[in-house]
């Protein structure tokens, strides 16, 4: 699980390096669509979704977006998705491994995944990268709370009674 998270973060940090081929697709924030009859290389998509009406000869990576493969189409490489779903149409295939964190795999009848599968369903996995930040955030909150509490002067009510 940590390897998958590290791989996705590394891929996001090196997005421009993936755009080296003419038929590779890289996008941040806008959806990627592979047209029918078109064959592309690798696809990297951050904060967007991938729709495959053609074929992919390389790998597909999607961060906070879904991957949809039409019926009879294929991805020849690996597929990694964080924060989205994999939707395979009837008769579609993935030739490599599939890793999904915080999403589901929706497979139609006749669709195949030839490699291994690592699927962590449930959106709570998106909070996993934020867990190391919870301790410093908690300490900062506690300091601010204690400083504000010490500065606040509680009102004195007549005869020692509250409202």
Image (cartoon, rainbow, N blue to C red):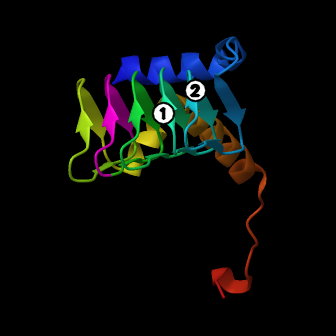
Residue 134 seen by the camera? no
Q: Nearer the viewer, residue 39 or 128?
A: 39
* Image position of 21 (left or right of 55): right
Check residue 107 for magenta coloring. Answer: no
Q: Horizontally, is 109 left or right of 68 in the view?
A: left
The quarter of the rendered structure image containing the C terminus is bottom right
Q: What secondary structure is marked by label 2?
A: strand
Residue drawn at x 47%, y 22% is 57
Residue at image x 58%, y 45%? 49
What span is in magenta? 90-101
Question: To which quarter of the image does residue 17 belong?
Answer: top right
Q: Quadrant of residue 30?
A: top right
Count neighbours of disc 1 (C-alpha within 10 A) and say few if under 14, some if 14 to 19, many if 20 or more.
Answer: many
Where residue 147 sits: x, y (%)? 72, 44
Identify the mark nearer the N-term, 1 or 2: 2
Seen from the viewer's position, the closer of residues 85 and 128 is 85
For the residue labelled by badge 1, is the local secondary structure a helix, a strand or a loop?
A: strand
């Amino acid at each position: 699980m940590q390897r998958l998270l590290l791989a996705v973060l590394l891929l996001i940090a090196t997005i421009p390096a993936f755009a080296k081929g003419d038929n590779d697709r890289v996008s941040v924030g806008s959806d990627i669509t592979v047209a029918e009859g078109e064959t592309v290389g690798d696809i990297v998509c951050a904060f967007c979704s991938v729709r495959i009406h053609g074929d992919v000869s390389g790998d597909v990576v999607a961060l906070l977006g879904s991957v949809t493969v039409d019926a009879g189409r294929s991805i020849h490489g690996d597929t990694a998705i964080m924060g989205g779903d994999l939707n395979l149409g009837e008769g579609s295939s993935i030739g490599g491994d599939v890793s999904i964190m915080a999403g589901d795999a929706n497979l139609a009848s006749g669709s195949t995944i030839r490699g291994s599968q690592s699927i962590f369903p449930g959106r709570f996995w998106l909070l996993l990268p934020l867990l190391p930040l919870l301790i410093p955030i908690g300490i900062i909150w506690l300091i601010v709370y204690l400083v504000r509490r010490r500065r606040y002067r509680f009102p004195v009510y007549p005869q020692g009674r509250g409202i």
